[in-house]
Amino acid sequence: MAYKIASETCINCGACESECPAEAISEVDDKRKIAEDKCISCGSCASACPVGAISE
């Protein structure tokens, strides 16, 4: 199951993108988005998010 980023909570800091080993996170419309087909569900992004915007 791919992780999801809550767009209303995301502050677009980029911390999640730099921690993603699968390079599944990119910026879309001033927010970060996880590509479900690339996500390996490792949780690195969720651990890196300073505002808790990422969950399974």
Image (cartoon, helix red, strand yellow):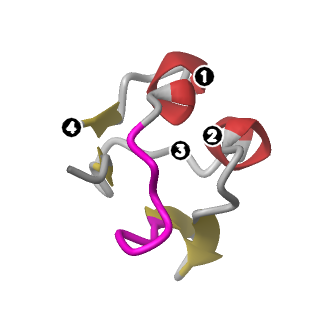
Q: Which residues are magenta?
A: 34-41
Direction front: furthest residue: 40
Q: Mark 1 or mark 3, which is nearer the start of the sequence?
A: 3
Q: Mark 4 or mark 2, which is nearer the start of the sequence?
A: 2
Q: Mark 4 or mark 1, which is nearer the start of the sequence?
A: 1
Q: Secondary structure at mark 4?
A: loop
Q: Quadrant of residue 13?
A: top right
CB atoms at circles 1 and 2 under 8 Å apart? yes
Q: Quadrant of residue 30?
A: bottom right
Kind of residue indicated by mark 3: Ile
**Around disc 1, counting alpha carbons within 10 Å, would you say few (fewer than 14), some (14 to 19), or many (20 or more)?**
some
Which residue carries the number 1 mark?
Answer: 48
Q: Secondary structure at mark 2?
A: helix
Where in the figure is residue 50, as x and y percent of width and height? 55, 19
Tag shown at residue 16: 2
Tag shown at residue 56: 4
Question: Gap between marks 2 and 4, in whole Å?
Answer: 14 Å
22 relative to 14, above or below: below
Which residue carries the number 3 mark?
Answer: 11
Kind of residue indicated by mark 1: Ala
Residue shown at the point (44%, 28%) measured from the top left: 43
Q: Mark 3 or mark 4, which is nearer the start of the sequence?
A: 3
27 relative to 20, above or below: below
Residue shown at the point (60%, 51%) measured from the top left: 12
Left or right, 36 with respect to 1, comes to right
Question: Gap between marks 3 and 2, in whole Å?
Answer: 11 Å
